[in-house]
Amino acid sequence: MLKCRKCRAELPDDAKFCPSCGAKQDISRKPKSRGNGTGSVYKLPNGTWIAIKVLGRKIDEQGKSHRITVSKSGFKTKKEALLYLPNLTQQTKEEKRKTVTFRQLYDAWEPTHKKSKSTMDCYRAAMNHFRPVWYEPVCDITVDDLQECMDDCTAGKRTLENMKALCGLLYKFAIPRNMAMLNMGQYLVVNGEAGIGKDGLPKEALDVLALNVGKVPYADYIVAECYLGFRPSELLDLDVTDYDRAKKAFVGGAKTEAGKNRTVTVSPKIQSTIDRLTGKKIAGPVFCDSSGSRMTIEVYRQHFYKALDACGIDNPITEINGVKRRKYTPHSCRHTFSTLMKGVQAPDKDKLALIGHTSTEMLRHYQDVDIEGLRRITNAI
């Protein structure tokens, strides 16, 4: 004797509903028209339909998870949107490849590399020095981006060697998985090899750029970076809310504990530029693109090279191990700032606080930095 699926009362053999509670007995569902992961469609408020597919998730710099999707809208009917779904699936591999970040690449590689704990600890330490590119798509990262991370590392030669080795392993893992086309690790150099050093823009080049502010696009950004000392990524991350108009100082920076949220006073030489860029804004990027949106490092690098060319500043290209590299890059401005400070008589702790070197960790624990002490340096450079 059959029993009701709900109240367990006895049912006739051919009962479709329970005579006691009325529950329907046949609850078989129609097979799904689409499998999991094949995408979905829905109607938009304007009456058209959209086809959408979730590619995965990414983690931003604040640790928040966001969906990565690919979609196409504007379909007049649900049927048209459904028919287009396979086209979204064809895009999936390429779109997913373009969104893999350097950090995600490392997280995927690490479990596959079976070495001793001490070796893996060395690689983890080396990875921390690549923090400026953690959240950049691997396909957008250039050899200059990675080399700048190494050039800015104040650790010993062994750490630099580990950084180079780590990059080689990561790209060796990435290439057969279609995440990268070229092994960048083989082109990186440890300082001291092949005559590579940290080239800052010379004072005469800085003077020429200053004379062309307002004439050559983005010359003002380059001059400002030279007098602020922020890394290129830090400069582009500066928000209007990071600027204290009363104190005429920024609070920004990242990458290392010593460099996070450091106070950098504004030199009188760029005060008019900062006043113009911040204006009456209450939020938003200070160093933005022409539309007011946050600028990427890649776009800033292009503007940097064009500005130097327009000002007649020689920026030769050298070839090392088959890779062409320019003498001056946006990171050169940070070295210019360090050079300018050499001529200023001031406590080392104040200079190190402005530049945000990791070697100041203990100083920052035990010594207070006076903002007026910082201002005396930036006013003098």
Image (cartoon, helix red, strand yellow):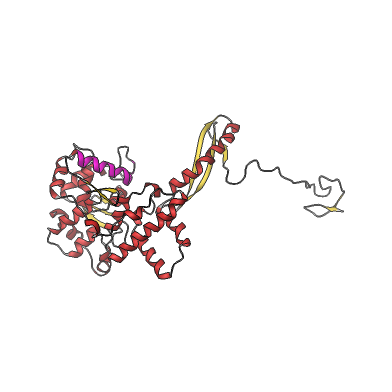
**Which residue in the rendered view is the most extreme toward the front?**
322
For residue 309, what is the image quadrant? top left
Q: Residue at x 21, y 54 (%)?
A: 335
Whole-percent x, y for residue 36 in the image: 60, 46
Query: Magenta segment range?
Result: 293-309
Q: Position of residue 357 (x, y in %)?
A: 25, 61
Q: Position of residue 88 (x, y in %)?
A: 53, 39
Is 177 displayed left or right of 310 in the figure? right
Is residue 40 one of those drawn in magenta?
Answer: no
Res 363 visible? yes
Of all residues, the one furthest to the top in this rendering is: 76
Regarding residue 246, the answer to whether it shows in the image is no
Question: Does residue 295 belong to the magenta stretch?
Answer: yes
Q: Is residue 3 above or below residue 122?
A: above
Q: Determine the residue positioned at 48% across, 62% down.
A: 111
Give 103 or 347, whichever is nearer the viewer: 103
Above or below 191: residue 298: above
Magenta stretch: helix, strand or loop mostly:
helix
Does residue 296 appear to the left or right of 264 in the view shown? Answer: right
Q: Is residue 381 above or below residue 218?
A: below
In x, y percent, where is residue 299? Answer: 31, 42
